[in-house]
Amino acid sequence: MTVFRMPSLGADMESGTLVEWLVRPGDRVKRGDVVAVVETAKGAIEIEVFQDGVVRALIAEPGAVVPVGAPLAEIAAEGAAAEVAPAPPTPQPAVTPPKAPAGPTAAPPPQAGRVRVTPAARRRAAALGIALERLRGTGVDGAICLADLPSPAPPKRVPAGFDPAAMRAAIAAAMSRSKREIPHYYLSETVDVSAALDRLTRINAERDPPARLLPAAILLRAAALAIAATPEVNGWWEDGRFRAADGVHVGWAVALRGGGLIAPAIRDADRLALDPLMAALRDLVQRARGFALRGSELTSASITITNLGERGAASVLPVIHPPQVAMLGIGRIVVRPWVVDGTVQPRQVVTLTLAGDHRATDGHVGGLLLTRLAALLADAERL
């Protein structure tokens, strides 16, 4: 028998509110199934289970504020003889479901036995006017869950239930802990990215606008490869020692339209070519701003990148997100006079800044990462 506990969805999380269960006692679950929705300062997050088995009992009731690490449910191993406990009563939701937008009439709820769908997915489908009969579910026993719905356009207003002040307080708590506990060191390097951007221009010249690559894709690709070659910065500081990650799981910092910041992970980013990496990046940013992330995307990042983009400052000094041991900052691409083959030319350059944890690495290792990243950007055909 295993106790499924409230996961920590970041260093700034102390507790979460259980919004709803997506399973019942007796349901079979497998690793990666979404079993609950939890409300945190970062919004409503789908929580996955990390083992195969049968739900024996639901311990926490919807609406309860559950501390990190507190029991949520009991899960018996597949085939184990276990008496199934009744599910806790489900209260009426406190929030009125959103009204359907003007346009096509929302599809009516399917009849029992025809389409299995979680309550949260049913409400969102009704709000978006999506016919559930056309979707294929990936949840427990084929149930349609939030992740199966087409991603909506980023909201123009802050969703109900999102508290920017609470998120800002959570960010402040995490960053205060970081500066208090982590002995930061900083390294920076200004790099000529003209070759990389020229390659991007050649690729995009033959594409329609929706399929074009953004500079963020080629910067992320180069960073992921450089991180893979520098495993000392890719992992977590836990129990007084460094634990290396099993892959390059890059947390990408996303600024939310309602205020605040969130950094969900792109797993195995070093294994993705430019096009799938761009697709993953677009999907992640859209779902982050639509508050449709999964818990694993908030907990698996092994290193974080903050990219200021074309509207940002020329450089940034990152603050490491604990328990990670490094964070990479990418400033705005700017045109600067640059010496090339003994002559001064206008070139497009970017300032890269690494924040490292002196408990895990030193400036030599951090410098190797920046040197590798600069070399990759200079030899753009390798990306």
Image: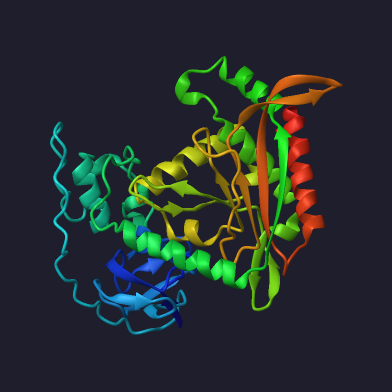
Identify which residue, 149 or 158, lies in the foreground. Answer: 158
Identify which residue, 87 or 324, lies in the foreground. Answer: 324
Give me the residue at 14% from left, 45% from top. Answer: 99
Residue 272 vs 301, above or below: the answer is above
Give me the residue at 41% from left, 48% from top. Answer: 288
Task: Specify the color scheme.
Answer: rainbow
Residue 151 vs 72, above or below: the answer is above
| Quarter of the picture holding the C terminus | top right
Residue 300 in sight from this viewpoint: yes
Q: Quadrant of residue 346?
A: top right
Instruction: Tell how many labels.
Output: 0
Q: Quadrant of residue 200?
A: top right
Give me the residue at 51% from left, 68% from top. Answer: 176
Residue 89 vs 157, above or below: the answer is below
User: What percent of the width, then of the height, locates residue 17?
Assistant: 30, 70
Residue 345 located left or right of residue 174:
right
User: What percent of the width, then of the height, locates residue 248?
Assistant: 65, 52
User: What percent of the width, then of the height, locates residue 350?
Assistant: 65, 35
User: What percent of the width, then of the height, locates residue 132?
Assistant: 24, 44
Residue 12 vs 67, above or below: the answer is above
Q: Quadrant of residue 79?
A: bottom left
Residue 114 in sight from this viewpoint: no
Identify which residue, 343 or 353, lies in the foreground. Answer: 343
| Quarter of the picture holding the N terminus | bottom left
Residue 57 located left or right of residue 30:
left
Q: Please identify the residue farthest to the right as the structure is shown.
A: 342
